[in-house]
Amino acid sequence: EIQRNKMSVNIFALVIVLGVLIFFHELGHFLVARLLGVGVETFSLGFGPNRISAIPLGGYVKMVGEQPDADLDPADIPLSFTHKHVFKRILIVAAGPFFNILLALIIFYGIFQISGMLILKPSIGEVNEGTPAYRTGLKKIDGVKISSWEDMAKMITTSKGNTLSISVLRGNSMRISDVTPEPKIFKNIFNEDMERYVIGVTASGDFFTKDLNVFQAFSQSFIQTYQITALTIKGVVKLFQGRVSPKTLGGPIMIAQMAGQEAREGAINLIFFIALISINLAILNFLPIPVLDGGHLLFFFVEAVTGRPVSIKIREIAQQAGIFVLILLMIFVFYNDIARVFLS
């Protein structure tokens, strides 16, 4: 019974996550198409004859004259996607993944505005023996007040091994000590060796919530979106370079498990997860693979440079190749998902 309820939550959370992501993606295409004078015949969330289909595992916006070889009524030519200037077509296609980025920004802004920002205190939990530090309760470094563990770590890292004057608060007494950071090799999230200067302390794990005003929340939402986007792009690049294992890729089953887990943790966790997946979806769609938005953008950029559209025959061959690649990718991620379930 517990397992059944868990699966139900996973499926429900997956439908919510995919529904929100796909709706915003297609909404981007729809709004920019209408803004630029392109007629829209269908806005569908999911696949099927209805505007909102039963299973939102995909979605599409069908525009007037979307296919270059479509037979059009002369009256529809002013509304035709194909007959619009190439830069307008680029904007319409790019609007889908851009709206996924916009969704992440909106979600992060809402979270920061409502819940504030969690900040790890510059409070030391453990001091490793034999390391440059043997203290607790950092207060200042070189006269600069430390308000978070991140600030402290940044100052130590950028010291490049130069001696720092550290003020330590223990109880009600303040003690000032000179500490010389030492280099140490760490593994980053991509399992790569990274050298970082440290003083040999670990955080206590205590947090405090900092309330943000409208402008601070707005700024932090951009910072958070940028950091996650940059990290995701870096991960994709390292995946193609072979420096990240393809076994880390996941499909619907993994997303459902993660979404269900976040849903059980609370609404804020699930909403944050939606923002995270939305950024991933945007980056995936910007990849120059035919049938994805990035593939269409590639054709349009070629047209913008050469002054003539890519031939329909080349497009058809590229589309077939793109579909083949996506099918292989889907099979692979499903295999990864199933392997995780039965081998974990």
Image (spheres, helix red, strand yellow):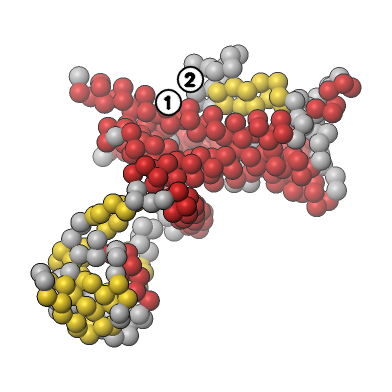
Residue kind at label 1, given as amino acid type: Val
Residue annotated with mark 1: 15
Residue kind at label 2, given as amino acid type: Ile
- The answer to whether mark 1 and mark 2 are in CB contact below 8 A is yes
For label 1, the crowd category at 10 Å Cα-Cα, with few meaning under 14, some 14 to 19 and many 20 or more, is some
308 relative to 180 in the view: left or right: right
Report, in whole angstroms, how far the alpha carbon at label 1 lies from the one at label 2.
8 Å
User: x, y (%) of residue 327?
Assistant: 54, 34
Quadrant of residue 252 within the rendered picture: top left
Quadrant of residue 41 within the rendered picture: top right
* Residue 269 visible here: yes
User: Which residue appears at 83% of the width and 34% of the height?
Assistant: 83
User: Which residue appears at 42% of the width and 27% of the height?
Assistant: 16
Residue annotated with mark 2: 55
User: Which residue appears at 31% of the width and 25% of the height?
Assistant: 9
Mark 1 or mark 2: whose residue is earlier in sequence: 1
